[in-house]
Image (tube, rainbow, N blue to C red):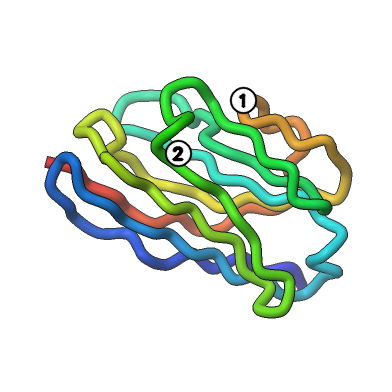
Amino acid sequence: HVQLVESGGGSVQAGGPLRLSCVASGYTYRRHCMGWFRQAPGKEREGVAAIDSVGTSRYTGSVKGRFTISKDNVKNTVYLQMDNLKPEDTAIYYCAAGRFGPPSAYSENWVDYWGQGTQVTVS
């Protein structure tokens, strides 16, 4: 049974940082691609960042330079460090995992598993 559990969401003032974590279990984590997506109120879910099994990362244009995705293979955890947050970053953030890459930061077509989501609010 594959499980992705996010944490670290919350409320923050514009310009501040926040770090999301996603702990994975139930599969061979190291071989999987991982990523983060988000869904703002009234909008479709969109990609944020992705990282493949060897650590190559990809970002969408709206977050590039402000967000950093990383993974810890020992802890089976993927992180999203978010700096210089803006009100438009407010959304539910979802962790994603896929068996086959390359993982796109823009498309969901590589995703096999989803987390339950964590709320990020920037004011």
In the figure, 87 relative to 44: above or below? below
Which secondary structure, mark 2?
strand
Question: In this rendering, would 35 be left or right of 97?
Answer: left
Q: Residues within 10 Å of mark 1 (few under 14, many from 20)?
A: some
Which residue reaches farthest bottom? 74
Which picture quadrant has residue 100?
top right
The residue at which mark 1 appears reads as 106
* Quadrant location of the N terminus in the rendered image: bottom right
Identify the residue at horizontal 77%, vertical 74% (top origin). 26
Which residue reaches farthest top? 61
Q: How far apart are labels 2 and 1 at the CA level?
A: 11 Å
In the figure, 57 relative to 95: above or below? above
* Quadrant location of the C terminus in the rendered image: top left
In the figure, 122 relative to 54: above or below? above
Q: Nearer the viewer, residue 45 or 82?
A: 82
Which badge, 2 or 1, comes first in the chain's sequence?
A: 2
Where residue 103 appears, x then y in whole percent?
Answer: 75, 37
Identify the residue at horizontal 50%, vertical 29% (top origin). 46
Question: In this rendering, would 107 be left or right of 64?
Answer: right
Q: Nearer the viewer, residue 20 or 43?
A: 20
Question: In this rendering, would 20 be left or right of 107?
Answer: left
Which secondary structure, mark 1?
loop
Q: Type of residue at label 2? A: Arg
Where residue 25 appears, x then y in whole percent?
Answer: 71, 75
Q: Nearer the viewer, residue 86 or 96?
A: 86
Q: Type of residue at label 1? A: Tyr
| Residue 38 tag number | 2
Identify the residue at horizontal 81%, vertical 55% (top origin). 32
| Residue 17 tag number | none
Identify the residue at horizontal 85%, vertical 50% (top origin). 99
Where residue 110 appears, x then y in whole percent?
Answer: 78, 37
